[in-house]
Image (cartoon, grey):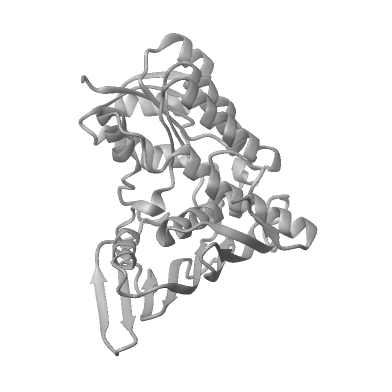
Amino acid sequence: MSKIRVAVIGCGAIAQRRHIPEYAANAQAELVAYADPRIERAREMAEIYGGKAYASYEELLANEKIDAVSICTPNYLHAPMAVAFAEAGVHVLVEKPMATTEEEGKQMIEAARKNGVYLMVGHNQRLMPPHVKAKEILDSGRLGKVLTFRTSFGHPGPEAWSVDGRDSWFFEKDQAILGAMGDLGVHKSDFIRYLLNDEVAEVAAFIGTLHKEDTAVDDNATCLLRMKSGAIGTLVASWTQYQGGDNSTVLWCENGVVKIGTVSGDEVIVELTNGTVETYKVGAMATNEKQVPSGVIDAFVESILNQTPPSISGEEGLRSLQVILAAFESQATGQIVKLQP
């Protein structure tokens, strides 16, 4: 097969720092077009990486023959754009959260299925070296059952990350819909499901805006999760970790504890009940300050080339989104929310 012809929609931070450079580095992919309502951003990418710039995705679709697309837009646009590209027979990689409602997520999955294209969600936490290693250790079974856990993801907020700083769409409720939970919480609901090979059965949550001013989106959440296996744990998402941001997970198991990203960010530590301590240096976690290749783009391209459905599928993205939506329901009702089996 000749190179996969790719378009990128939305030329903000995630596109500039991850999607576009990673496509450019992949010998099997060819960047042919970019769309952004601020067309100068699309033009800048086209100048650096080659291809054409458009002010809208509709115009791009009407003028370009593409095989695949990355959707890197504000959250509220993920679903309509994904559906439009799927209906045009284009494979879709969408940033997380895949959608802002369960209904939207289902529409995206159905559009991809009906049109025989792949839908992949950019849950890059699954692919980070410490996370891959930790899963391998857990899957080996030598630690026994996971009993309790905590997983968290926090940083100073999108103003430090977004190309628009404090004026970013991340803070606009009508565009983001979900705040820190859509940005970071959904990464961790996806990761804990993947790591434990288990589903979330019940959620209780406190979600609020504690410190970011002039915004209606959440900047902090602390959730209690009960998994189908019975394991219980906490999930934290925060945009106010102004010092010492966190992307760590600790699992207490029958035969020991696994600590991921607790020491200098690039290690997995296993402390067994027999007193043995194992340390694995397997490469860094990506952070906003220090980008490392995510592996998401390569996995997407490989999936298309080999005609094998992506492991981080729309269905997986939807299950991870459902956990977050259940957490918002818990905050709104003050109740523990059960997820559908």
Residue 5 x %, y %: 31, 21
Confirm whether residue 324 shows in the render: yes
* Tag count: 0
Q: Residue furthest right?
A: 333
Q: Residue furthest bottom?
A: 275
- The answer to which of 32 and 278 lies nearer the viewer is 278
83 sits left or right of 125 in the view = right
Residue 27 x %, y %: 20, 31
Q: Is residue 191 above or below residue 250?
A: above
Task: Please identify the quarter of the rendering in which residue 18 is found.
Answer: top left
Task: Please identify the quarter of the rendering in which residue 337 is found.
Answer: bottom right
Q: Residue furthest top?
A: 63
Residue 308 x %, y %: 31, 33
Residue at point 29%, 28% (across, down)? 307
Residue 36 x %, y %: 50, 26
Q: Quadrant of the N terminus?
A: top left
Q: Is residue 120 above or below residue 255?
A: above
- The answer to which of 169 and 96 lies nearer the viewer is 96
Residue at point 59%, 26% (across, down)? 80
Confirm whether residue 38 shows in the render: no
Task: Please identify the quarter of the rendering in which residue 122 is found.
Answer: top left
Residue at point 31%, 58% (across, down)? 132
- The answer to which of 251 and 31 lies nearer the viewer is 251
Q: Is residue 337 above or below residue 274?
A: above
Residue at point 59%, 65% (across, down)? 225
264 sits left or right of 150 in the view = left
